[in-house]
Image: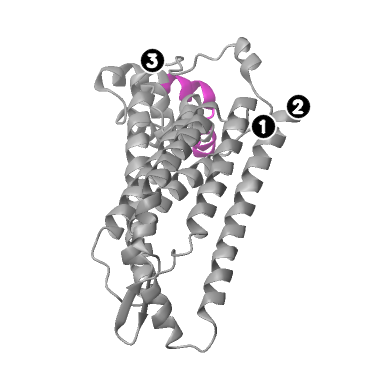
Amino acid sequence: MNLRDVYIDEVTSRIPESMRQDVALELESTIDDMTGNDPSETALFEALRQLGDPHILAARYANRPLHLIGPALFTQYVNVIKIVLPIAVTVITILSVIGYLNNSIDDTSWLPFLIQAFLQVGAAIFNVVVQTLFWITLTFFIIERAVPEGEVPFSSWKPEQLKKVKPRSTSISFGSILFDFVATVLMVVLYVNAEQMIRVVMNGKSYPLLNPSVLDRFLPFVIALAVFGIAIAIYKWMVRHWTKPLALWNALFNVVWIVVTALILLQPDLISSDAISLIAAQISIDVETISRWGVRSVLITVTIVCIIDLAEGLIKAFRR
């Protein structure tokens, strides 16, 4: 078998059997025309070089793409990943954190606790990322090969859509929305489990740092605030840019957050008396002073973060 026949066999063996005879005859004629009256090996090599890789030529004849996701679907493929992947990561992060915190918490140091939490949540996130990318890619792989040539599914773009495009200066990043979701859920979980998670452990003795009765008294306000925050985060995800109503609702949420935080932190019996006694027995510094400055520091931090968030929304929404 000469090189021409080997090349033709390499092509035809990779296409449907019903096409092989016609393609073989076409290639024989094409190669003979390209070599002309010069049947030398050099002329044949040049002809075959121009025809190219037989794998690629076979894919063209069989109309089978050699790429996983082609240019016609790649934009939609990336857009689906941008939407689905953050949602999947957010959900699995929240569920993993809640599941881990619901486990029994030993009175040990925070470092092993945090390391174990990081490893467990990280493994869950890695697994969901791999699974999400696999199934999205498989779906588009099937669509790529099932759709007739020339058709572009999911594409319904019209010039009129440009009227709905908002300035990029008012856009809301998905990262900030994700942070809002996660921070809100973690805040509620931490608040509900504060008696087990925020404790003072010294010399084998353990007491909750915060008074459970005070936390229970404000629990309905915290739950209502969390629902308010999640609703705003969902609204942000839906519109994806700052509008005046959204900025005003976001400002109200931050103001209420500051007020509720201040009401809780400024309760005179917020710090457990047992925890204060245990700390006072170990250090010579005035525990009341330490607790007062600690409460003030937390309140100032929350206030600064809320002011920055509400200012960003108001500035972006009203400066146009």
- The quarter holding residue 140 reads top left
Foreground mark, 3 or 1? 1
Foreground mark, 3 or 2? 2
The one of 260 and 317 positioned closer to us in this rendering: 260
Q: Earlier in the sequence, mark 3 or mark 1?
A: 3
> Taking 308 as reference, is 320 left or right?
right
User: Callout 3: 10 Å neighbours few (<14), some, many (20+)?
Assistant: few
Magenta part, dominant SS: helix
Q: Which residue is mark 1?
A: 170
Kind of residue indicated by mark 2 = Arg
Are the residues tagged 3 and 2 within 8 Å (C-beta)?
Answer: no
User: Callout 1: 10 Å neighbours few (<14), some, many (20+)?
Assistant: some
User: Callout 2: 10 Å neighbours few (<14), some, many (20+)?
Assistant: few
- Coordinates of residue 239 in the picture (x, y in percent): 54, 26
Residue for point 51% across, 20% down: 33
Are the residues tagged 2 and 1 within 8 Å (C-beta)?
Answer: yes
- Coordinates of residue 79 in the picture (x, y in percent): 49, 31
Tell me the distance, in whole angstroms, between the alpha carbons under discs 2 and 1.
9 Å
Residue for point 27% across, 68% down: 105
Q: Which residue is mark 2?
A: 320
Residue span colored magenta? 27-47
Mark 1 secondary-structure assignment:
helix
Q: Is residue 291 visible?
A: yes
